[in-house]
Amino acid sequence: MIFTSPNKIIKTIRQDDPDFIIDNGISIAPRAGIEISNDCPRQYKLMIIEAKKNGWLQSVAYMKESEYMWEKLGE
């Protein structure tokens, strides 16, 4: 008996992908994001905001391929 396992078990979803936004019909939310602590120095916050605005820093979500498959089947 031969068993094969999938090469890719983690699904990467980038902020440009249509599946990055979760929509359950009642609320809409991104799958991932960043949170900047209030304790973060102002100059670092400004650098992070600038990097996000220029596309140098992007939100990426990871989920198991099996979870993604079940989610798509449920749609």
Image: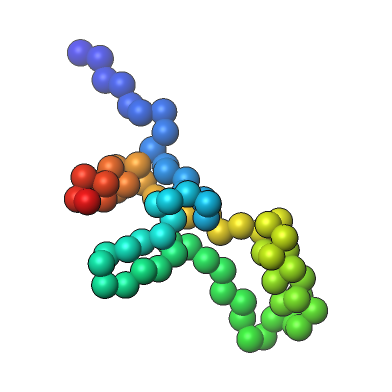
The vertical placement of 7 against 74, above or below, is above
Would you place residue 67 above or below residue 39 in this image? above
Instruction: State the image coordinates of residue 25 (x, y, percent, origin top left).
Output: 25, 67
User: Residue 34 in the image: x percent, y percent?
Assistant: 56, 69
Asked which quadrant contains residue 20, the reply is bottom left
Please state the horizontal and vertical placement of residue 1, each as a whole percent of the image: 20, 13
The residue lying furthest to the top in this view is: 1
- Whether 29 is drawn above or below 63: the answer is below
Q: Nearer the viewer, residue 3 or 36?
A: 36
Residue 52: x and y in percent read: 67, 64
The image quadrant of residue 73 is: top left
Asked if residue 62 shows in the view, the reply is no
Left or right, 68 with reference to 16: left
Q: Residue at x 25, y 14 (%)?
A: 2
At 74% across and 68% down in the image, what residue appears? 50
Residue at the spot 31% in from the left edge and 21% down from the top edge: 4
The answer to whether any part of residue 60 appears in the image is yes
